[in-house]
Amino acid sequence: MPQTTVTKDPAEAVSDPVGGVVTLSNVTFTYGGATEPALADVTLSIAEGECVLVTGPAGAGKTTLASSLNGIVPQFYRGKMRGTVLVEGMSTKQVPIGQLAHRVGLVFQDPADQLVASSVEDDVAFGAENYGVPAEEIRHRVSEAIELVRLSGLAQRPPYALSGGQQQACALAAILAMRPNILVLDEPTSNLDPLGSKHILQIIADLVKRESRSLIVIEHKLEELLPLIDRIVVMDGGRIIRQGTPDQLFRGAVLHEMDAAGVHLPQVTRVAIGLEKAAGLSLTAPSGRAPVTVEEGEESVRSLFSRSGASGRARGGEGKRGVLAGSPAEAAAPIIDIRGLTHIYSGGNVALRDVDLRIRRNEFVAVIGQNGSGKTTLVKHFNGLLRPTRGEYLLDGRPTAKQKVSALSRRVGYCFQNPDHQMCNLTVREELEFGPRNMRVPAGQIKQRVDEAVESMGLAHVMEKNPFSLSKGERQKVAVAAILTMQPEVVVVDEPTTGQDFKMGREMMEIARQLHRQGKTVIVITHDMSIVAEYCERAVVMCAGQVLVDGPVRDVFSQPKLLETTSLEPPQVTRLAQRLGDLGFPPDVLSVEEMVRILAEALKGGVRA
Amino acid sequence: MSVEYIPGDTIFHRLDPRVKLLAFLVVTILIVSWSDPLFMGGLFFSICLALKLAGVSWRTTFGIVWALAPVVIVYFVFNVFFKPITDPHVLLELAPGHRAPWNWSVSLEALVWSLAAVFRFCCILVTLRGILLLTPVREIILAMVKLGLPAEFGVALGIGFGYIPVLIDENRKIREAQMARGWEYEFKNPIRRLQALYKMLVPTLMNSMRRGNAIAVAIESKGFGYNIRRRTWYKDLHFGGADRAATIGLIALAITGIVIGGPWLNLAGFELTTKLLLPLLGH
């Protein structure tokens, strides 16, 4: 098979001290203009064919680590670098990116930033073309890569017309067609919906099984990946704090340490940690480490129960099922009242079909469903960005057909997914004043509103800065604060956790919870079921433009079969409880804490050795 | 103007993009050589018919003309009043006694000339639109690279085209986010609407910069900077028999057009239609 040969200048090849295909020796890197290093004294060696998972909280240095492997750091993103990164003996400080990229294929978080051509096959061919691979060989590689990432039949489509998951698969195929020896995936699923994530995780599993190249995956979805990998590298604050096999790291004090550092662990693992803290009992998978998957969780609980005394039968649940029915909220008039809503886009695509939905004041509602199910189309009607093709939308009992977006948005605030689309001023202060100014709020009141929002969001230190210069987390906060200064009664938050770090996602949801406590009606669109379970009262499940289920979160998640029809899954901990129904576990356990409580209660009698 | 490609396997799809660029050149030669609306209209409808045969709906073809109708109308009116005519057959006198710098009257000749001018404009529109609809962007760019455009520019151009839909989508999101904060775009007055647009400036610029950076990283990571001189194209152009035949046909058409319209025969000047219409006016 013809392969382009990369000419390695012998002078550039530095001898490799450890013998890995990738070796980092005491690497410290500080971005130009930054004070703190993004990587601090990192030493790491990756062997030929090894599959390594890198994880850790936001700001841990994971992306910088990935970018340092093909020379993007320090050649494109400049800064101060100490130590050496060797890729197959080539120093990333000296060998040009183009030459390194041929050996190290990098797939980034946001698929939209990586697609460069007008059709899928052109995009997949792009890299191989740059390396001067003969046309015949490229055609062969393109069809092979497209098949491998499960995009057969879509080769002629423009990439922008694909779903997020398909776009990311296309970006991955483009790298595979370059035939790199080392593949690096930087959070490839964090911008995707559950179906898209599943698609990418399946491809990763296929790759691990059939390929011999080295694979480095930066990911938070440990449940799916742990069974596939050889080694985990845990980073925090630019350092590698732990590394080892899953069996070495997922046990005892090391696990507690990772949890404390903010590593996003699977819920089942967190149940094991919680139970050990609360009752001194350890849940272990057969291999002796803490459980990671639902299956391991089930097995470990059953084994613990079989060793426990006769009292070991779970009782519980919070007893709040059907909380909406008959509650005072039921009697109140709805603030958002959608009647027979059908929305057809100009191209003829029917996005919503005869939807009825009533949301009462001070409800905390999650709208869930796959991309394309109509969630965003639905909520965009709430402030008039979209208008019904058929049907009616009443806001607080009044028809909205003749009200402008500017009038509706005084009452319904809408936080968009990407804060960068919302910023349109050069200082944070102007940004926060923008909404109330448009509403012609008197100057004195604007100041008061801005002060309040700044106080509650903790933004005082950035008021005179350019919003675009802030960190992603801060930008998201500014975007929310800019809606709060308009003092809407209803707050819609569109995918607060997509593309966000676990901790930041939680922070956003805490803000939403605060708003709800202040009496606001909060509507969240999200793909993260554990967030729905922990924060929301009511879930509206959308599927193919219609409401599939609508009810209290506990009721909705107690129907896994129904959710499955739209490829949604209840949170891991809920699924675990549902599998343990025969032991008395209720089917609507919503949080890790709840599960730990039920387990501790049931096992109070003690466990036989 | 959108850049969506309509997939298909007609002769118009299969022609080498260089032939299509030649066709554009020939259309340009013809409309410069001719100025009679009968010839020009004939050319316009022939192009439209060719597009129809290639699978482009009438709606799509005329859509571009319709979208630019205001420009077409202004262009027509401009020509009626600015085309210098010697010895005009005046139909409507606006300000008797006035002369240059512009016509203070509507004459038959000016109307005929302006109609031809509108067809000229529309010929260019539908030809360009047709080429973009029937040729993948990469082929057009590859043709330009083969004709001497540096490969770096070609690749950059291709990426630019690929991002047009992404940018349109991004602009929509920015607009919606601002509307959701009470900024008004829903003005009937087009000037107010234009004024409202300035708020797009900061986010559009900032996002373009961010995206530009991300794309640069992405293409560097795909070996764009490796060795552009040695770059290959996996679907190379193939200049076949049909292309040769079409090239000969197009060149013949251009020569015929020049001969008919040139100063020697001058058969395609706007005087032709004028002469045909004069009897109707009783002259």
Image (cartoon, helix red, strand yellow):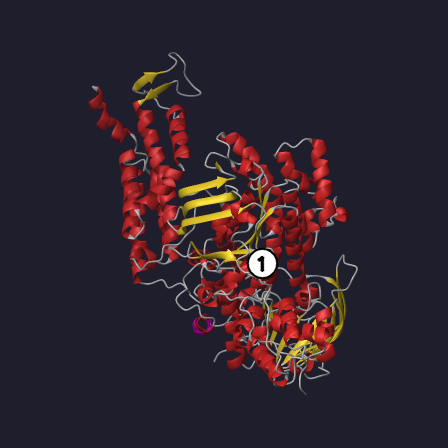
Give x and y (percent) for residue A434.
65, 38
Residue located at (51% from left, 44% from top): A336
Q: Quick one: SS at disc 1?
A: helix
Give x and y (percent) for residue B41.
29, 38
The correct choice, above or below, for B164 with respect to A138 in the image is above
Q: Main secondary structure of the magenta part?
A: helix
The correct choice, above or below, for A571 with respect to B133 in the image is below
* Res A541 seen here: no
Q: Nearer the viewer, residue B166 or A475?
A: A475
Q: Nearer the viewer, residue B184 or A455?
A: A455
Give x and y (percent) for residue A178.
53, 72
What segment is highlighted magenta in the picture? A140-145
The correct choice, above or below, for A492 with respect to B218 in the image is above
Residue located at (39% from left, 35% from top): B69
Give x and y (percent) for residue A41.
77, 72
In the figure, is residue A59 to the left or right of A574? Answer: right
**Disc 1: which residue:** B215
Quadrant hosting residue B126: top left
